Amino acid sequence: MNQANRNDPRYIRLLAGKIAEQARFLGPLTLMHVCGTHEHTIVSSGMRSLLPDTIRLVSGPGCPVCITPKEDIERMIHLARSGLTVTTFGDMMRIPSDSGSLADAKAKGADVRIVYGIANALSIAHEEHREVVHFGIGFETTVPTSSVALASEPDNLSIYSVHRTIPEALDFLLSNSLAVDGFVDPGHVSTIIGSNAYAFISERYGVPQVVAGFEPGDVMLSVLMLLEQRAEGRAEVENEYVRAVRPEGNVKARTLIDETFRQVDAKWRALPVIPKSGLAIASKYREWDAVHRHRDVLESFSYTPREEDSACRCKDILLGACSPQDCPLFRRACTPDAPVGPCMVSVEGTCYISYKYG
Amino acid sequence: MMCLAIPGKIIERDGNEGVVDYDGARIKVRLDLVDADVGDYVIVHTGFAIDTLSEEDALESIELWRQIGELQDESGQSQ
């Protein structure tokens, strides 16, 4: 395969032809990716229109902001209202909870700041001598950046971890009989955890997987590789993104994650509790765990779960069970300027991407 | 939080901090998670280099992203 032509329209058409050829001998298949950046590539390149009708390429729960539970957002709002400085990625600011969003809290005077990464939060804590709580969201790509901060034992900074892990989510989806015939695994999560991390899933469920890069040619080739596995009766983890992903991942980052975090059962917004899919801060670093450090403030927090807006289909969209166009609110009552569900707020959300680039 | 798929080149390093160049745009990055030095190409996520790429793969990827950018400019889309 001539990699230099990865995005050449002729190469993409060649792949589309090979995909169509394979698909003729296979029944209808559903392939799922779990990455906002993959969805962006798929939508902005118009890739779905190049796939045969029998091949569904759907988006799963790969938007970290979208799957962060409302209760945790409300806890962060509570911390911010108590006078602490809260730092968060920009995407999270406008995500609605029953008590409004972090942006609403900021408008009412709370000190909530958008940061590009946790290094900015460290600077605020250090230079302004303020007590900072960083909202630690994200999958394994972001987790080691939190680990670096924890390991530096910073002054004035703690992390409220809602970090989540991808392989445990894939395992959960399949164990709950989600009909997926192959996974396109996320490229940059895999640079950290390595392609080996998904092997147990293929072994347990007989489902093929391909770790994919982010260029249109990467994703198309990954779809073809999945179909080839299906056609040959194989169920393995293959690596399309060899230029960046190693079987063992980034060992330095993995070692830091193991030292600073421990696996816990965790809730995902719109999904139930997924066993071992969350990362809580290890007891050795308890001093920098916002849940422990600000336990006095959090003691006065109470939460009564409310049903999500019944018309919003974010839950089904996060499971790949429907597309944004199937939601009655999409483009009508729900737009990026006035979003109803998290999938329309985040730049990684399936609805936002479809609205902007579809 | 979106993944930035385009590799950048480390042009300065001071301990665990460095500067990465993206076709003239320069950003500060932390280098705690990689064994990389000035001249190496890295993938950056939320201000941290998370992976290194060979120069050959990096230059090819940069070129391909540039082409995608140009194609999208021509079709009137802005990304």
Image (cartoon, rainbow, N blue to C red):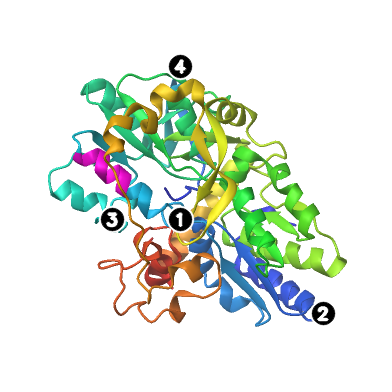
- The disc at residue A94 is 3
Circle 2 packing at 10 Å, graded few (<14), some (14-19), many (20+), is few
Q: Which mark lies nearer to you, 2 or 4?
A: 2
Q: Quadrant of residue A88?
A: top left
Q: Amino acid at mark 1?
A: Ile
Q: Is residue A154 toward the left or the right of residue B62 in the image?
A: left
- Sequence-first disc among 1 and 2: 2
- Within-10-Å neighbours for mark 3: few <14, some 14–19, many 20+: some
Circle 4 or circle 3, nearest the eye: 3
Q: Which mark is residue B15?
A: 4
Range covered by the magenta-colored residues: A74-81
**Residue B24 visible in the snapshot:** no
Q: Earlier in the sequence, mark 1 or mark 3?
A: 1
A54 or B54, nearer to the observer? A54
> Is label 3 in a helix, a strand or a loop?
loop
Q: Amino acid at mark 2?
A: Phe
Tag in front: 1 or 3: 1
Q: Give the left or right position of residue A146, taking residue A197 as reference.
A: left
Sequence-first tag of 3 and 2: 2
Pointer 1: what residue? A67
Q: CA distance from mark 4 to mark 3?
A: 36 Å
Q: Please name the amino acid that badge 3 sits on.
A: Arg
Q: Residue furthest top?
A: B15
Q: Which residue is mark 2?
A: A25
Work out whether residue A301 or residue A358 is closer to the camera in this orientation and state it.
Answer: A301
Q: Chain of mark 3?
A: A
Closer to us: B8 or A235? A235
Parent chain of label 1: A
